[in-house]
Amino acid sequence: MAGSKVTVGNVEIVSLLDTPMEFPWAAFFPSVPQAEFEAYRDLYPGSFGADKFRTYAQCSALRSAGKTVLVDTGVGTGMGGRLLDDMADKGVSSRDEVDVVVFTHLHMDHVAWNLGADGKPNFPNARYMVPQGDWDAFTKPDVAAQNPHIGTMVAPLKDLGVMDLFSGETAITEELTTYPTPGHTPGHTSILVSSGGEKAFIAGDLAHHPAQVDRTEWCGAFDGDPAQAIESRNKVFDQLEADGLIAMICHFPEPGFGKLVRLEGKRVFQAL
Ligand SMILES: [Zn+2]
């Protein structure tokens, strides 16, 4: 297994594990028979539990241009998350050093460490960048009612004056740019890292099981717009394969770094 840190030009990417999780196959991938996944068990043993889909709530810390940028804040203490401890273990030792938190999207497993028990931000010096498309979608009254974490974990950032909405391709630093990859959610966003002639791609929830780099048409239950999710997967995975970029995919086996390569006609996620 690769280490938890990768260097891309002058940018350091630190993969952070909040917690592994397991779900019944039929609940997570209701439209794909479990037996279909079995063809991928030998390639991706880390994504198979005993009889469940094994997945990971991961975040990443990017050190770029003198800043520390945290991508997503995990699933939180309610599901046994240990993000803050993992940050300390991997050298992101102080919550104070995070300058920017950027969200790939607003599902609960990506925002849950935003606030401490005291209601104050866990990253007290950070601005929090929220995709406009997700903010608009998830704050609609009927949607917010079904997603109570928006009211408890996201909306307070606005009230506290630390939230910035963004859309499209927006510079976070001169080396980090947001890149729209809609479908999983309306505002779902990836992060393109470009530094010193090297590039990498933080892909958020563009896929959940590594078999999906080959079977891009397979959708999870939480892909809000399946057709658009498939379109984004095809577009980005074709490009990552063609250019040989390092990708970090949040829910893939830790640390989530890999490249997309062809092996006997199949596109494969080759972990670093
Ligand atoms: Zn997720």
Image (cartoon, rainbow, N blue to C red):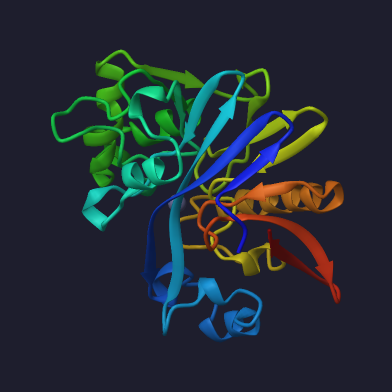
Query: Residue sitting at 38 percent across and 47 percent down?
Result: 86
Please state if 6 lies on the left or on the right of 70 as rendered.
right
Quadrant in the rendering for residue 157? top left
Q: Position of residue 81 (x, y in %)?
A: 30, 52
Please state if 8 lies on the left or on the right of 124 as rendered.
right
Q: Position of residue 32 (x, y in %)?
A: 55, 75
Query: Residue sitting at 37 percent across and 36 percent down?
Result: 138
- Count every numbered label the image shows and give the total: 0
| Foreground of the two, 217 or 175 | 175
Please state if 104 lies on the left or on the right of 88 as rendered.
right
Q: Position of residue 127 (x, y in %)?
A: 41, 19
| Foreground of the two, 64 or 74 | 64
In the rendered view, tell whether residue 117 sits above or below residue 228. Answer: above
In the rendered view, tell whether residue 160 sits above or below residue 185. Answer: above
In the rendered view, tell whether residue 258 sits above or below residue 158. Answer: below
Q: Please state, as top left, top right, bottom left or bottom right, where the C terminus lies in the image.
A: bottom right
Query: Residue sitting at 52 percent across and 82 percent down?
Result: 34
The answer to whether residue 171 of the structure is visible from this angle is no
